[in-house]
């Protein structure tokens, strides 16, 4: 059986379907899974083990047999903890077949086959009774079904079903409860991930201000959570407006309701400011007394406790529908609405002299429908893209470069997704501006642009071309030749830094429409590379071996096998502002791409070696693109700054960089202090992909 996979084709800028072997999906799932990260999460594992031991001893203390139901068992780790804590029998449920097979092997290898039955089903399909999957209902419920938002992986409906059909009334649960905490903040940086700010342009005829259309200004955005490593957000980038408050909690030992509902708390701001963002995280109590607690609280909440790094559970950023000015000490109501899988927030001011009856009336105002983006911008641009468009120093670089190349008779064509460049080109004096919003099949972005142009009285000034570059006709350009071709370049389908080289392919497709003296901006691009040591990110690819005394090497082998299937020869995208690393080498330019010429017929390749100037563990290479807009003006999608003493790096916060983990990380054989790394890098013209190989 073949699998069809959707992937962006960097040579066409389109999503295309590729046929893959039947094992592809499975290998992708394993190679990119967070199992390794969870097995390395010492805090989580220790707390679960303590909670399971306590639950088994409470049941045994009542003179009952301890029968455990473990939903989403993964490697079987939690079931093995229960069996070694003295549970009489464990039912371990795992819906993903390759994982269930691995759990059977791991359980057998650790000598628990007589105590643990692995069931390869969804928990809602499990049967109970003499002929069922389970002989009887369990009296201990153990699960790890949580994501950063707590409920995003379907924990609530799973618990609801388990209490109805799979566990006894009054069962023990590990974890026993989860509590969600919130804090109201003002943050220009985080708010810039939801709103488009006005752009100021100094033009020949005075200052122009580019404003977003009202439908974008008033749009609530999309309800999907923005999950980030909040521990990497410097305290200078936000101001807390409230104390941390408990928003809601769920007791997993009692029947759970998954139906949509809302929770409301009263807040009094500790300082005045603009309420824009709700920061949120959760903790879990593994026991009823709350003595065994595992928390996701960020650094400023528990500054004394050592932070456990983890990538499978982070913290949440929620955007309020609108910015709300608040005063210190005034009475506010914060409402959290949720459905089965997601949460969203609203803030209301209390009315003066409000009493209990008014408060009830307030509650009746709450609408539990999920927010819907109607302006289309939140469907077209992800949050980092909003941040990039709001980055004033980046915009200034493009303005400065456009000033150098535009003339009053310039015929300008812009190729980039959801870009402000056509408006900037018009304001800076181009005679004629055409725009390819190249993804015309994606949520009709030309409607967004028409609203945008209308809001700025530019309807008749910028022409949207609704065709693909290879289908461009002279009539689209009013029979004129293009004298200035511009792009950021940015395309929504790009995953890795070099996928934005689609601009080069589009430039090649329109080459017959270019004037002989055409100026292309950017004029060229270069691929850069640096060898790094990660503070923590290496853990997601590192084998675990023994976890809390249990041998999980079968899982390590399975991940390694799937990485070798394809992934370990490929780079993967990561936003490195969230994942600190130190450079072991100087940054090196490895390939250049000349946009003044068409894409060549032959592949571009290079090989060489890079010297390691600092001592450390060579975990991998980071790769990024730099675009050379005009003389002396370049923008980097990767390294922004590096301190030479320590090698600490500052990365572009709006882009994901490409990370290639060395096989020594996957094999867990980090070489001590290699002096150089050799590399071979090949850019395949036909596919637009880069293949690479490194040797320490």
Image (tube, rainbow, N blue to C red):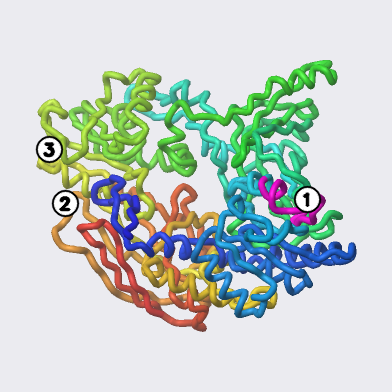
What residue appears at the point 46 percent right and 34 percent down from the top-left corner? 378
> Which residue is denoted by mark 1 in the rendering?
253
Question: x, y (%) of residue 375?
Answer: 44, 26
Dot in front, 1 or 3: 1
* Mark 3 closeness class: few <14, some 14–19, many ≥20 residues within 10 Å: some
- Secondary structure under tag 2 reads loop
* Mark 2 closeness class: few <14, some 14–19, many ≥20 residues within 10 Å: some
Q: Whole-Å distance between the Cαs marked 2 and 1?
A: 67 Å
Compared with residue 214, is residue 597 higher up or lower down, i.e. above or below? Answer: below
What residue appears at the point 75 percent right and 46 percent down from the top-left corner? 179
Question: x, y (%) of residue 347?
Answer: 68, 28
Left or right of 346 in this view: 481: left
> Which residue is denoted by mark 2 in the rendering?
597
The numbered disc on residue 419 is none
**Placement of the N terminus among the 4 image quadrants:** bottom left
Q: Are marks 3 and 2 in contact (CB under 8 Å)?
A: no
What residue appears at the point 89 percent right and 65 percent down from the top-left corner? 63
Q: Are marks 2 and 1 in contact (CB under 8 Å)?
A: no
Left or right of 533 in this view: 359: right
> Which residue is denoted by mark 3 in the rendering?
513
What residue appears at the point 41 percent right and 80 percent down from the top-left corner? 696
Q: Is residue 151 magenta?
A: no
Q: Earlier in the sequence, mark 3 or mark 2?
A: 3
Span of residues in magenta: 161-177
Compared with residue 546, is residue 95 higher up or lower down, i.e. above or below? Answer: above
- Secondary structure under tag 1 reads loop
Q: Nearer the viewer, residue 208 or 508?
A: 508
Q: Nearer the viewer, residue 90 or 293?
A: 90
Question: Can you tell which quarter of the image residue 188 is in?
Answer: top right
Q: Whole-Å distance between the Cαs marked 3 and 2?
A: 14 Å
Q: Is residue 5 at all visible to an observer of this figure?
A: yes
Question: x, y (%) of residue 152?
Answer: 59, 46
């Amino acid at each position: 059986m073949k699998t069809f996979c959707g992937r962006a084709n960097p040579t066409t800028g389109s999503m295309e379907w590729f046929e893959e072997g039947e094992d592809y999906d499975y290998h992708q799932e394993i190679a990119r899974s967070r199992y390794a990260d969870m097995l390395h999460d010492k805090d989580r594992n220790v707390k679960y083990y303590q909670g399971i031991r306590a639950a088994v001893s409470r049941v045994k203390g009542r003179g009952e047999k301890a029968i455990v139901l473990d939903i989403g068992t993964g490697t079987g780790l939690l079931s093995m903890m229960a069996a070694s804590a003295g549970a009489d029998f464990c039912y371990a449920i795992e819906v993903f077949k390759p994982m269930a097979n691995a759990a059977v092997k791991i359980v057998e290898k650790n000598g628990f086959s007589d105590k643990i039955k692995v069931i390869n089903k969804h928990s809602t399909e499990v049967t109970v009774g003499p002929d069922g999957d389970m002989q009887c209902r369990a009296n201990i419920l153990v699960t790890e079904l949580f994501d950063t938002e707590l409920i995003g992986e379907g924990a609530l409906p799973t618990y609801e079903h388990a209490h109805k059909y799979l566990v006894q009334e009054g069962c023990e649960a590990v974890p026993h409860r989860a509590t969600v905490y919130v804090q109201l903040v003002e943050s220009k940086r985080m708010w810039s991930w939801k709103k488009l700010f006005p752009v100021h342009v100094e033009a020949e005829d005075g200052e122009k201000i580019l404003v977003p259309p009202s439908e974008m200004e008033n749009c609530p955005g999309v309800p999907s959570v923005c999950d980030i490593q909040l521990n990497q957000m410097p305290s200078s980038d936000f101001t807390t407006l409230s104390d941390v408050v408990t928003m809601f909690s769920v007791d997993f030992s009692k029947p759970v309701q998954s139906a949509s509902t809302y929770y409301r708390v009263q807040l009094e701001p500790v300082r005045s400011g603009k309420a824009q963002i709700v920061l949120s995280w959760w903790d879990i109590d593994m026991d009823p007394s709350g003595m065994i607690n595992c928390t996701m609280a960020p650094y400023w909440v528990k500054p004394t406790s050592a932070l456990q790094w983890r990538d499978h559970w982070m913290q949440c950023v929620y955007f309020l529908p609108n910015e709300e000015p608040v005063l210190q000490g005034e009475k506010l109501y914060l409402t959290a609405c949720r459905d089965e899988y997601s949460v969203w927030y609203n803030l209301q001011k209390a009315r003066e002299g409000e009493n209990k009856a008014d408060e009830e009336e307030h509650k009746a105002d709450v609408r539990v429908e999920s927010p819907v983006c109607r302006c289309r911008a939140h469907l077209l641009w992800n949050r980092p893209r909003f941040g990039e468009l709001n980055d004033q120093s980046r915009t200034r670089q493009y303005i400065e470069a456009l000033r150098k190349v535009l003339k009053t008779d310039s015929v300008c064509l812009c190729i980039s997704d959801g870009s402000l460049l056509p408006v900037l080109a018009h304001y800076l004096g181009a005679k004629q501006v055409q725009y390819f919003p190249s993804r015309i099949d994606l949520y009709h972005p030309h409607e967004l642009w028409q609203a945008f142009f209308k809001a700025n009285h530019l309807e008749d000034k910028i022409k949207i071309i609704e065709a693909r570059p290879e289908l461009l006709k002279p009539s689209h350009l009013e029979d004129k030749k293009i004298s200035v071709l511009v792009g950021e370049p940015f395309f929504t389908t790009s995953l890795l830094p070099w996928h934005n080289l689609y601009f080069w392919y589009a430039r090649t497709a329109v080459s017959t429409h270019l004037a002989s003296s055409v100026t292309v901006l950017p004029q060229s691009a270069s691929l850069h590379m640096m060898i790094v040591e990660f503070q923590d990110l290496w853990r997601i690819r590192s084998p675990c071996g023994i976890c809390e005394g249990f041998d999980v090497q079968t899982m390590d082998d399975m991940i390694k096998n799937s990485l070798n299937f394809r992934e370990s020869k490929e780079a993967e995208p990561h936003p490195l502002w969230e994942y600190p690393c130190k450079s072991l080498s100087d940054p090196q330019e490895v390939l250049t791409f000349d946009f003044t010429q068409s894409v060549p017929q032959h592949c571009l390749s290079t090989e060489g070696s890079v010297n390691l100037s600092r001592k450390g563990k060579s975990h991998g290479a980071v790769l990024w693109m730099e675009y050379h807009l005009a003389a002396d003006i370049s923008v980097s999608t990767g390294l922004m700054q590096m301190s030479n003493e320590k090698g600490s790096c500052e990365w572009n916060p709006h882009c994901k960089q490409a990370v290639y983990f060395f096989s020594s990380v996957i094999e867990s054989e980090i070489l001590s202090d290699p002096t150089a790394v050799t590399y071979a890098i090949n850019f395949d013209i036909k596919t637009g992909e880069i293949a690479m190989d490194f040797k320490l």
